[in-house]
Image (cartoon, rainbow, N blue to C red):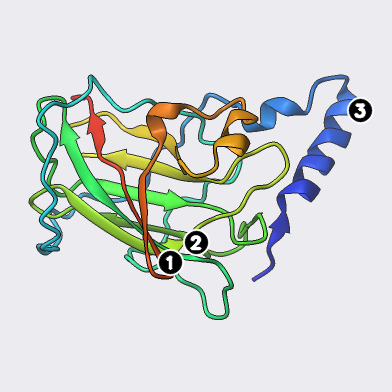
């Protein structure tokens, strides 16, 4: 499956925009959010993660742009690891909650990100996948840490929706990349993953708070 360089895509979009007399930058700041095309099938089997919910929830997780590289109808899976990848393994887990910190069972969480070379797979499903939360609202993905590409600090795109909640589209960031984060105009501190390292494996947690539909 061919992968396309973000730089190449941006360069092509820039040439097209220049010909039209408009800026190429908005390709990374479009405000739309594509609807996910999955049926709610109920809670997943208990993942036994034992994640304690926060004692107080925010009014709602900050939303962010979808960007130009979303692909719907991704595989349902928990591991996004690709054979032969040189990327550092990341286990990303967390809870999906309502504003009063109640678990959203059977919520859909769909993630996608670039590979260790800053490329998105726009022809297939590398580093793309979705799953449903268990009864406690928990999810867990095993993937790699994406790298930076021109104009962006490393990040993970996310879409989340419960059967009775609004859809959230956002991005997650890494706290150990302060300099890159500060140079990214889209970055927001409230979307930092709680990150630690255990040997060669990174462990990240982020809890999403969703508004009612």
Q: For mark 1, what is the residue?
A: 80
Mark closest to the chain's N terminus, 1 or 3: 3
Q: Position of residue 72 (x, y in %)?
A: 46, 50
Labels 2 and 1 touching (C-beta < 8 A): yes
> Which is nearer the eye, 169 or 81?
81
Graded by Cα atoms within 10 Å as few (under 14), some (14 to 19) or many (20 or more), the crowding at tag 1 reads many
Labels 1 and 3 touching (C-beta < 8 A): no
Mark closest to the chain's N terminus, 2 or 1: 1
Query: Does residue 41 appear left or right of residue 193 in this picture?
Result: left
Q: For mark 2, what is the residue?
A: 127
User: In the rendered view, would you say 63 is above or below 6?
Assistant: above
Q: CA distance from mark 3 to mark 2?
A: 33 Å
Graded by Cα atoms within 10 Å as few (under 14), some (14 to 19) or many (20 or more), the crowding at tag 2 reads many
**Quadrant in the picture for the C terminus:** top left
Q: What residue appears at the point 37 percent right and 25 percent down from the top-left corner?
A: 62
Q: What residue appears at the point 14 percent right and 41 percent down from the top-left corner?
A: 104
Q: CA distance from mark 2 to mark 1?
A: 5 Å
Q: In what element is the residue under mark 3?
A: helix
Query: Does residue 59 appear left or right of residue 34 in this picture?
Result: left
Q: Which mark is residue 120?
A: none
Q: In what element is the residue under mark 1?
A: loop
């Amino acid at each position: 499956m061919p992968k396309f360089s973000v730089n190449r895509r941006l360069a092509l979009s820039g040439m097209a925009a220049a010909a039209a007399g408009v800026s190429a930058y908005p390709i990374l700041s479009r405000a739309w959010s594509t609807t996910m095309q999955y049926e709610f099938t109920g809670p997943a089997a208990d993942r036994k993660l034992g994640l304690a919910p926060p004692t107080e929830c925010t009014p709602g997780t900050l939303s962010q742009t979808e960007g130009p590289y979303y692909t719907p109808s991704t595989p349902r899976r928990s591991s996004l690891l690709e054979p032969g990848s040189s990327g550092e393994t990341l286990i990303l887990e967390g809870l999906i909650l309502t504003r009063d910190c109640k678990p959203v069972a059977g919520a859909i969480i769909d993630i996608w990100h670039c590979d260790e070379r800053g490329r998105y797979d726009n022809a297939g499903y590398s580093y793309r996948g979705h799953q449903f939360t268990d009864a406690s609202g928990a999810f867990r993905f095993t993937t790699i840490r994406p790298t930076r590409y021109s104009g962006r600090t490393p990040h993970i795109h996310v879409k989340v929706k419960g059967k009775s909640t609004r859809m959230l589209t956002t991005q997650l960031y890494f706290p150990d990349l302060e300099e890159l984060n500060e140079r990214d105009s889209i970055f927001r501190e409230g979307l930092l993953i709680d990150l630690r390292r255990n040997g060669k494996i990174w462990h990240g947690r982020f809890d999403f708070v969703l508004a009612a539909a």
